[in-house]
């Protein structure tokens, strides 16, 4: 069972993503709607972890990582894996949060998924996967989203998936003034 460290969206932005998940489910693309996941941006995924160490490390990572504003400006897809997602505007704070996750927590995971590594990672909020009839229908539904979607990443979560279960969560630090 794989494990992920994710940054969860604030309630208002998450409600918009959940509405998109409902629209996609109505069009026959159900996985995210039915998954039990919180709307998020994944930072790292491993096939196995030292769970007690990672849970302790997650709390320390969250305490040292400020919540960050995020703007999703477009819908895109990983065509090779059939994933439709919201793509955020990438900035230094998002990249720093990602790098910090790998520096602080990487030693607690085994068999890291390489496309989440620093320098390779494409930040995204998944809207659809496990698409039964190709991407076109899912992209058509997702592209009806009103963008840009502005939100804030407010919580770090350790999740196990398939099925999705949140194992630990910690609020990110307050945003620094200035």
Image (cartoon, grey):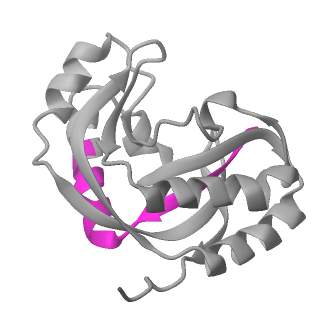
- Asked if one can make out residue 39 in the rendered structure from this viewpoint, the answer is yes
55 on left or right of 154: right
Q: Nearer the viewer, residue 147 or 135?
A: 147
- Residue at image coords 38%, 89%: 177
Q: Is residue 13 magenta?
A: yes
The part of the chain drawn in magenta is 1-20
From what the image shows, is residue 25 above or below residue 166? above
- Residue at image coords 61%, 37%: 116
105 on left or right of 34: right
Measured as percent of width and height from the top left, residue 62 is found at: 63, 74
Residue with the most extreme bottom position: 177
Q: Nearer the viewer, residue 68 or 51?
A: 68
- Residue at image coords 43%, 34%: 31
From what the image shows, is residue 140 above or below residue 79? below
Q: Is residue 18 magenta?
A: yes
Measured as percent of width and height from the top left, residue 120 is found at: 57, 32
Quadrant for the N terminus in the image? top right
From what the image shows, is residue 39 above or below residue 2? below
């Amino acid at each position: 069972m794989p494990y992920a460290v994710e940054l969860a969206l604030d309630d208002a932005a998450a409600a918009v993503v959940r509405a998109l998940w409902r629209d996609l489910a109505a069009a026959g693309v159900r996985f995210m709607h039915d998954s039990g996941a919180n709307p998020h941006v994944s930072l790292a995924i491993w096939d196995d972890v030292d769970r007690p160490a990672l849970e302790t490390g997650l709390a320390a990572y969250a305490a040292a990582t400020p919540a960050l504003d995020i703007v999703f400006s477009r819908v895109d897809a990983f065509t090779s894996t059939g994933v439709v997602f919201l793509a955020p505007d990438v900035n230094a704070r998002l990249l720093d949060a990602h790098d910090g996750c790998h520096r602080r927590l990487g030693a607690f995971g085994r068999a890291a998924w390489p496309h989440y590594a620093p320098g390779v990672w494409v930040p995204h909020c998944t809207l659809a996967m496990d698409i039964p009839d190709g991407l076109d229908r899912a992209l058509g539904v997702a592209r009806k989203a009103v963008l840009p979607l502005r939100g804030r990443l407010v919580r770090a979560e350790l999740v196990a998936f398939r099925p999705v279960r949140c194992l630990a969560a910690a609020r990110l630090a307050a945003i620094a003034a200035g």
